[in-house]
Amino acid sequence: MAMSPGDIEDLIKTGIPGAKVVIRDLAGDGDHYAAEVIAEAFRGKTRVQQHQMVYDALKGNMGGVLHALALQTSIPD
């Protein structure tokens, strides 16, 4: 069973409070998404650390119900 964009967004927002999250379904199949995550919590973190924070927020769903996620992270302006 695939994850809905809303479920992905909710998990990320719960795991990274205050994050702005935009989810796009890349293939229309419910398995391939792109996520843009903007969060103050990323300040001072490397890109790898930022992505790890997002993966941690997804609670092990990457590679399972969530097949592919193109991830873009940044800090607020």
Image (tube, rainbow, N blue to C red):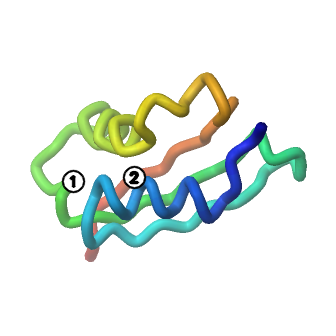
Q: Position of residue 14 (x, y in %)?
A: 34, 60
- Residue tagged 1: 42
Q: Seen in the image, is 30 located left or right of residue 71?
A: right
Q: Is residue 77 left or right of residue 63?
A: left
Figure check: 43 above or below 3? below
Marked residue nearer the N-terminal end (1 or 2): 1
- What's the amino acid at mark 2? Thr
Q: Quadrant of the N terminus?
A: top right
Q: Secondary structure at mark 1?
A: helix
As drawn, which residue projects farthest toward the front? 1
Residue at (44%, 54%) from the top-left corner?
11
Determine which residue is flagged by label 2. 73
**Residue situated furthest right in the rendering:** 28
The residue at 42%/59% (across/down) is: 37
Q: Quick one: SS at disc 2?
A: strand
Q: Position of residue 44 (x, y in %)?
A: 10, 49
Tags 1 and 2 in contact by the CB under 8 Å rule?
Answer: yes
